């Protein structure tokens, strides 16, 4: 790793490390002060505009619930021992639990206790957003140690009119066509399954903002999972139908897995779907290998909403230590140490590389299609034709004319109908190997990008 790369890694590492420590203790939910405080934290670094869909509003087939405000939740054993306390671990209460102040026998308490027999040292994450109930989450070891007697329960929560928030901002590019990056921000005290996605978005925002050129505009969205993406879609779905070229839901992007898993959009033919296939087939190289998964609505995250048949948007998903495939999924074993800030920065590197190739993987258009443009005056062709120059790509580059032949293929096939992937295949190389030539042709104003209208 060179000095500049190390400096960038360290800058991202420090910011994400500090941000994690600030955000992890917050008692978040799909509504209420926890998620709003969390979004406000990100607004220090990103110009997020926050909108709120009011309680009671009908959003497609859903009704916006009241806000959940939980001050503290505690459970005491008959001898006064404090068994559960959200001030110690905010997974300890069922998220959205109704207020309770009373004493219960062990028999009465048991239906309201949640633990994981197969992970006896883990506290599970349990929610009940749309049906009123209450309960506590604890390790199975502690649960097995409970004895008969009367247990004191105090859940200091209340429900208020308010709404479901979501936040969005845009980095403008040369085109108003958009690439969208989104993640959810609603789980409390989970590292990989919660904070890895929003923190990756923060790092990607900083990276993409620093790019010298953006061919697309980049939209960033933070929302509570499911209901938040539906709230966002209720106001933006028509805009996205017109402007969205491709997007990624970023989730579970930490952990020590050796590569990135890309889950395709329902359509299966988006810009990113095609690009991810090339990564999977090793036609492209990046910091981490990619694997490819077809779309399925039977699991996953907000892609299930964006790819619902009424929207059918070109949204894929990226994950590393994917949900359901590690012991800490939805429980207290999902820690900072498991997620790894270094793993997170490595994943950001891989996603940024993927996005940088997505920038040029579309359909280039030749600005001088009537015959070949005069390349020599642009130092893109040898100005002297002789035996000595027949292996030169230009006056300064002797490479067997590899670069020149690729350049000529690009100009010839850049008619707005061929993608750069098509051109790369014709050249027998990767998109990445054409990147420098594309940038030079753009500098000389010989090509630009024409993007097909999203269906």
Image (cartoon, helix red, strand yellow):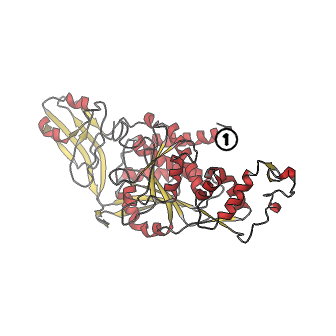
| 5 up-or-down from 244: above or below | above
Residue 326 in view, yes or no: yes
Instruction: Tell me where residue 323 sits by quadrant.
Output: top left
Q: Is residue 277 left or right of residue 386?
A: left
- The residue furthest bottom is 370
Q: Is residue 349 left or right of residue 371?
A: left
Q: Position of residue 404 (x, y in %)?
A: 74, 55
Residue name at image x 52 percent, y 69 percent: 453
Using the image as rendered, state which of residue 52 and residue 254 is in the foreground: 254
So how many labels did they put on this image? 1
For label 1, the residue is: 4
Residue name at image x 28 percent, y 44 percent: 126
Residue name at image x 67 percent, y 37 percent: 2
Q: Position of residue 84 (x, y in %)?
A: 27, 36
Q: Position of residue 307 (x, y in %)?
A: 39, 60
| 181 up-or-down from 84: above or below | below
| 249 up-or-down from 327: above or below | below
Quadrant the N terminus occupies: top right
Residue name at image x 32 percent, y 52 percent: 298
Determine crowd level at label 1: few under 14, some 14-19, many 20+ residues with C-alpha closer than 10 A: few
Q: Secondary structure at mark 1?
A: helix
Using the image as rendered, state which of residue 158 and residue 306 is in the foreground: 306
Q: Is residue 34 left or right of residue 289?
A: left
Q: Is residue 39 left or right of residue 114?
A: right
Q: Position of residue 431 (x, y in %)?
A: 61, 52
Residue 31 in view, yes or no: no
Instruction: Tell me where residue 195 sits by quadrant.
Output: top left
Using the image as rendered, state which of residue 278 and residue 217 is in the foreground: 278
């Amino acid at each position: 790793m060179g000095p500049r790369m190390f400096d960038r890694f360290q800058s991202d590492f420090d910011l994400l490390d500090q941000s994690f420590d600030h955000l992890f203790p917050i008692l978040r939910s799909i509504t209420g002060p926890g998620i709003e405080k969390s979004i406000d934290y990100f607004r220090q670094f990103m110009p997020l505009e926050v909108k709120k869909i009011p309680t009671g509003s009908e959003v497609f087939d859903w009704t916006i619930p009241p806000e959940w405000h939980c001050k503290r939740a505690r459970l005491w054993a008959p001898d006064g021992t404090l068994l559960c306390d959200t001030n110690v671990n905010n997974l300890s209460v069922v998220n959205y639990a109704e207020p309770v102040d009373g004493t219960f026998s062990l028999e009465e308490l048991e239906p309201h206790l949640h633990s994981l027999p197969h992970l006896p040292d883990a506290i599970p994450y349990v929610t009940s957003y749309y049906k009123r109930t209450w309960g506590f989450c604890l390790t199975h070891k502690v649960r097995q140690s409970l004895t008969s007697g009367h247990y004191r329960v105090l859940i200091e929560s209340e429900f208020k009119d308010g709404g479901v928030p979501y936040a969005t901002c845009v980095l403008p590019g040369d085109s108003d066509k958009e690439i969208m990056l989104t993640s959810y921000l609603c789980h409390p005290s989970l590292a990989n399954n919660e904070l890895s996605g929003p923190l990756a978005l923060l790092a990607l925002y900083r990276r993409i903002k620093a790019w010298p050129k953006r061919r697309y505009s980049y939209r960033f969205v933070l929302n509570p999972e499911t209901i938040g993406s539906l709230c966002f879609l209720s106001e933006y779905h028509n805009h996205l139908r017109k402007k969205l070229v491709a997007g990624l839901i970023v989730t579970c992007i930490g952990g020590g897995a050796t590569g990135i898993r890309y889950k395709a959009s329902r359509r299966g033919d988006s810009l990113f779907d095609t690009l991810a296939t090339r990564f999977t087939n090793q036609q492209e190289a990046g910091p981490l290998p990619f694997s490819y998964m077809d779309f399925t609505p039977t699991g996953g995250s907000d892609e299930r909403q964006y790819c619902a048949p009424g929207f059918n948007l070109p949204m894929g998903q990226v994950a590393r230590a994917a949900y359901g495939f590690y012991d800490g999924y939805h429980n207290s074993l999902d820690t900072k140490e498991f997620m790894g800030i270094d793993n997170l920065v490595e994943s950001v590197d891989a996603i940024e590389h993927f996005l940088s190739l997505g920038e040029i993987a579309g359909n280039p258009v030749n600005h001088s299609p009537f015959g070949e443009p005069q390349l020599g005056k642009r130092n893109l062709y040898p100005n002297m034709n002789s035996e000595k120059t027949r292996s030169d790509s230009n006056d300064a580059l002797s490479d067997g004319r590899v670069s020149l032949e690729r350049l000529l293929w690009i100009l010839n096939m850049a008619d707005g109908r061929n993608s750069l992937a098509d051109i790369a295949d014709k050249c027998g190389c990767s998109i990445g190997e054409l990147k420098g030539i594309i940038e030079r042709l753009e500098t000389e104003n010989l090509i630009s990008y024409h993007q097909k209208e999203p269906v």
